[in-house]
Image: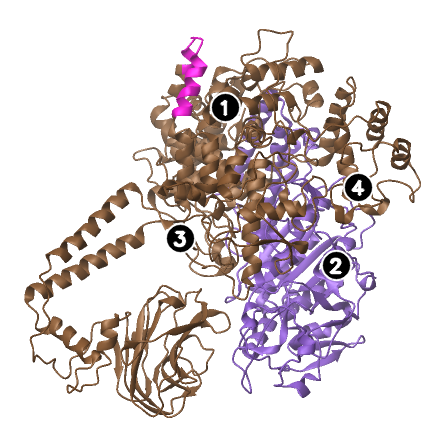
Amino acid sequence: MRPRWQIQVLLAVLTRMAFAQPVSFNRDIRPILSDHCFMCHGPDAGHRQANLRLDLAGAGKGFESELLRRVSSHDDGERMPPPGSGKPRLTAQEIDLLRRWVDQGTPWQPFWSFIPPQRPALPATQNSTWPKNAVDRFILARLEREGLKPSPEADKRILIRRVSLDLTGIPPTPAEVEAFAADSSADAYEKVVDRLLASPRYGERMAYRWMEAARYGDSNGYQTDGDRDMWRWRDWVIGAFNRNMPYDRFTIEQLAGDLLPDATLDQKIASGFNRNHRTTGEGGIIPEEYRVEYVADRAQTTATVWMGLTAGCARCHDHKYDPISQKDFYRLFAFFNQIPNERGFVWNYGPEEPFVKAALPEQAQHLAELDARVQALRQNLPKIDGPPRGWKAPRNWTVTQGLVFRQQGKGSYNGDAAEFGYLQPFTYSAWIKPASPDGAILTRLDDYMESQGHGLYLIGGKVRLHVTHRFTDLGLRVETVEPVKLNEWQHVSATYDGKRLASGVRIYVNGEPRETRILFDQNNEPFQKKHTDIRVGEGGGLKFDGGVADARIYNRALTPREAAAIAANGSFAALSKPEQARRDLAYLDLRAPKKIRQGLAAIATAQRERDAYADSIPTVMIMADGAHRDTFVLKRGAYDAPGEKVTPGVPEILPAAHAPRDRLDLARWLVNRANPLTARVTVNRFWQSYFGMGIVKTVDDFGSQGEFPINPALLDWLAVEFMESGWDVKAMQKMIVMSAAYRQSSAVTPELLARDPENRLIARGPRLRLGPEVIRDQALAVSGLLVEKVGGPSVKPYQPPGLWQELAGGKGYEQSKGEGLYRRSLYTFWKRTSPPPYMMNFDSPNREQCAVFENRTNSPLQALDLMNDVTFLEASRKLAGRILAEGGATPEARVEYGYKLLLARPPSAKQKQILLTMEARMVGDFHRDPAAAAQFLKQGDSPAAPGADQAELAAWTSVASLMFNMDEAITKQ
Amino acid sequence: MTRRFFSGLALASLLKGERQQHGLPGLPHFAPKAKRVIYLFQSGGPSQIELFDHKPRLLDFQGQDLPESIRNGQRLTGMSASQSSFPVVPSKFGMERRGQSGAWVGDLLPYTAKIADRLTFIKTVNTEEINHDPAVTMCQTGFRLGGRPSMGAWISYGIGAETEDLPAFCVMISNSGGGQPLYDRLWGSAFLPSRFQGVKFRSGADPVLYLSNPAGLTAERRRTFLDALSELNRSSLDEFGDPEISARISQYEMAFRMQHSVPELTDLSSEPAHTFELYGDDAKKPGTFAANCLLARRLAERGVRFIQLYHRDWDHHGQLPENLPKRCKDVDQASAALVTDLAQRGMLDDTLVIWGGEFGRTVYCQGHLTATDYGRDHHGRCFTMWLAGGGMKPGITYGETDDYSYNIVKDPVHVHDLQATILHCLGIDHKRLTYRFQGRDFRLTDVSGQVVDKVLA
């Protein structure tokens, strides 16, 4: 990113270039009007001044002289834009352009990006030998018009490193470089390109930028920022790129895979694209406010990624610059507003509905085996006959499995056995004879109602269970609909399944399940209340008025039959339901044939094993549409200010053969041949990934505040080609990297630099600092540390200790051991409120929201990072080990080898000399100071190379580190 | 040493291209009153009722429900919304008029009370936000959701810093027992280039991430290394002519300078005994708020533009009488010491110090209400902050709230107004410091903000 003034210099240069041609409304005039005038005289009806609109056909007609007079006036009361508007005065060049436009009769054009692209004819060029494909015809035609010449082709070694980094994110090996250098066949380069495109690394490389666009993260992003699992979606993306899934299908499955007929698991996983947004479970929020935020994020992200439109600008009012009304925004919003029962206040930890268990193939198979085993055991279980007539259960038999507390009378008791968190199931039960309708039956909390903990109460005569983290907003409360009887002994029990939801609570009276009512259902924060007494007949600030007996706590949720059994009152006279349940269970426990008892135990064990395994299967949040939810224009964008009701639909300005009605329609509309935006926006992002800037520099804005394409015919040709190729993504990458334009040398002369500092015209090859993920992956690859394995849960490589705790306390970052330290960077765990500092230092987007623009800065923190981060120091040590082991016997040979490993080419004589001098100095130095050498070699977890001379290894480690810090090393050139 | 590093290399002309510490052309927009800002952020929401906003009539209202006419249907946090009653609870702590100005300062802040005449109290700061994450994010980025640059990033983007040896924007988080989490985005650069992000200064071995050379690589060896690196990069520059290479050379130069300037900065051994008398003994313990205040002064002396401190754990939903005094003790002496110290050094005139949280607290009780115990929920409709120094009118109190410290009666100051005012003190017109992202010219104050002229000197 360059400072504004440089952009202005560039614009001035380009404007001068344009002088030779007639003024074009879209290229020259609309940007001026948009930037200075549309704010008050544009599409936003609510803010429009003087009833003047300059964004429509006929703009300027009839008041040409007034327009010119006002923009060039020196009178503050007259001048446009007015001084208080914050908008700058028009420059002399801009005024001149307007004047020439007026002279030409104010010709108008519809906005370029809303017109479907047609394939332009290939332009003629004077030089017919340079172009290698269609891309080059457009580039060269423009260069020739500007009086510029392309640069010579890059050196082969530089070129293979460039294309390897671009297509796979990993530099070529010396063998690959030498094979290419030695291959003089006409298709030598094409063979390299085909090999790279076929590598699984290609999918990882392409997935990385897509993850940024999709705001992928491994945590929820707000406040507590708990973990989530979305990596199965990430792996779907890698696979889709590697299989070269056509971009139209790629689009449909990610936007609406769940709505496809008979959607497969993979297609549902793909729809996770629009569940990657941030979510919050901060206590005290207003859920609907955030639910609206999630829906808006989906709409805005979709608009940015596929349409290049800043739809979010129309959330609070009509768009200031583009013909997108506020209503258009909410019609788009409506497509994404259909998740059934969507909550704004979500789980702080773990997936939020809707989600699927997304077993990997081997997991699915193992689970099926476990299911089959349970099934088989069930089938083999002999028929269970009830107890023989007249058999009586021993009087004192009761359910004892999981019984952790039992007391006959009121009082306070040690509660350590019942220290349950919010994820642990339990059962509370007791006999009660209430004299009044309010009281505490059995509690494990402090003696006031708001206390953290669990409590079984009688309130208003109804049996009530509380699970409380913080009474005001975190916990659950459930009560029976009907009250119990006063002054009569009754048995009450409540079970909780440990799954956080109030619907997992059952309340029984006299062993019968009772209808319940959920009073509160936000059991959203883990807790562990230590050293708290269990109180029988008291707690929560209440006392029990009446009798309480046989209070029990189990560390599991009893089954309905067990809940009945514990309500047996010991009377054998009438065989009540509870007594029947008790008798059946006792019989199974004590007297049933051994085969049955063993069989039941085996089933229980197998079921537990199966359930534990099922719990380990990754989940992924997906999209789903439920019963239609109405959508309203939200006034000022506020969640609580609904206005006009709207139906799902696309912006009116865009062509639509039929009106899309659901997400699937929307996705299909986006990849319809008539859609003017999707293909352009997509190929433009591809272009950016190779040349650093798009053909439209504002890759995220194809509206009137965005840039007019620097080479509109090239953009349209590529867009049409992309669509007509069947949206062939690999073919498009190949088209670009096969061009002569891409293959040029990136060396620049001062003249060319002055003429085109940002290389917009492509009179030279790209020279760009590598992205953070590539810098790290390259270091791992050339040092031999890289562990290549596609997909899987995110890993936690080196990170300075304490960063997470400083912000939020807790356990902090638990660094991986072994191979987790050395996986490619796209697998690094992304905690949104505290992202990996290394990645942020090198301009990674923060993954809070969709990001498609590539930023590249230069900062001292990057220098410190490359010099002192253990990641790079360990890689330096390992690279040094490789150089010593494989690089020959002489320092000269070793320097050359290291250079080839990292930069794919030999050093110049001067570079070699600098490195040799450094090496010689360091060897001597470390020989004199062996303790320092030993310390310096202690970086990282990987084992030291055995047998090496420590001083020599330390010296070469410093040389390797030096090489990793070279500008060339972190640059594709 | 710094000079020697580059003297032989004749890089001066080369380095002119990338003076990252300089701001934008045309900025500041007008003559600044303040050259730098120290923002003492009290995260969690300190109670204005106990600390600044004196409400004697609350004793009469004690235990009564907050009248509907006062609450007036305003939105409540999800926590309050499930409360069945809103009993008014007065402060358990005393408060008196202080100094010549007679500003109200609570007994829990005895040191702040002593410097009341130097401070400008604003009692009517307000925000629509009612929960921590959006409210802190609003204070620091001007928008409730993450994704906008932080105030410090805007300021370093706009006007750079007066040092080339330290970052323009530094952040310190003091150790506290617990409290609401913070988020990197609060000092992030969002869509501004990443070099404008706040650089965190930490209390451990590496005060800035990756600052220290690895064990065994002495400063001398690092010198050899950097000299060689510079030569290598210049050879690349010769070959490719890319100005980015010269920019990189200059960034390594600054990194090297930071390796010297930061340890020198964080080494407090040269501070005389009276410094520690002023700031308190806590200032000797790295990572405390007091130590960070002292570091803030040292950063200010060295030309850092925006110094952001955070102290957590002011979120007193319950047990406020037990916990609020602890937090006050953590910060009171050092906050006052910082202002005094700057004044003694003649730096207060051009240093703007800001003290406050993301919101205040409700007049009604939350949590366990007993004769001695209570808590308060979040309250964004009015809360108190103080400012001191560069550009502010000292010894005044601005804005009035009602008898319940619930609504504003006079002179509201929205968070955006405060931000506009802070930028104004730095010579920046908040409407004109913009950055185009996704087709829109964004600014710190979003679409609003009015400079509060009446608090300006």
Looking at the colours in the rendered structure, which chain would you say is drawn in brown? Answer: A
Task: Determine which residue is flagged by label 1.
Answer: A732
Q: Magenta residues?
A: A180-198
* Whether labels 4 and 2 share one chain: no
Say few, some or many: other residues with alpha carbon within 10 Å of mark 2 (under 14 / 14 to 19 / 20 or more): many
> Which sits earlier in the primary sequence, circle 1 or circle 4?
4
Residue A189 counted in the magenta span: yes
> Which sits earlier in the primary sequence, circle 3 or circle 1?
1
Task: Determine which residue is flagged by label 2.
Answer: B417
How far across and how far down the image is residue A775, in percent?
48, 34
Q: Main secondary structure of the magenta part?
A: helix
Q: SS at mark 4?
A: helix
Q: Is residue A781 above or below residue B432?
A: above
Q: Is residue A320 above or below residue B394?
A: above
- Judged by depth in the image, the label closer to the viewer, 1 or 2, is 1
Which of A567 and B443 lies nearest the eye of the viewer? A567
Q: Gap between marks 4 and 3, in whole Å?
A: 55 Å
Q: Gap between marks 1 and 4, in whole Å?
A: 40 Å
Q: Chain letter for mark 2, please.
A: B
- Judged by depth in the image, the label closer to the viewer, 3 or 1, is 1
Task: Determine which residue is flagged by label 3.
Answer: A814
Type of residue at label 3?
Glu
Type of residue at label 1?
Met
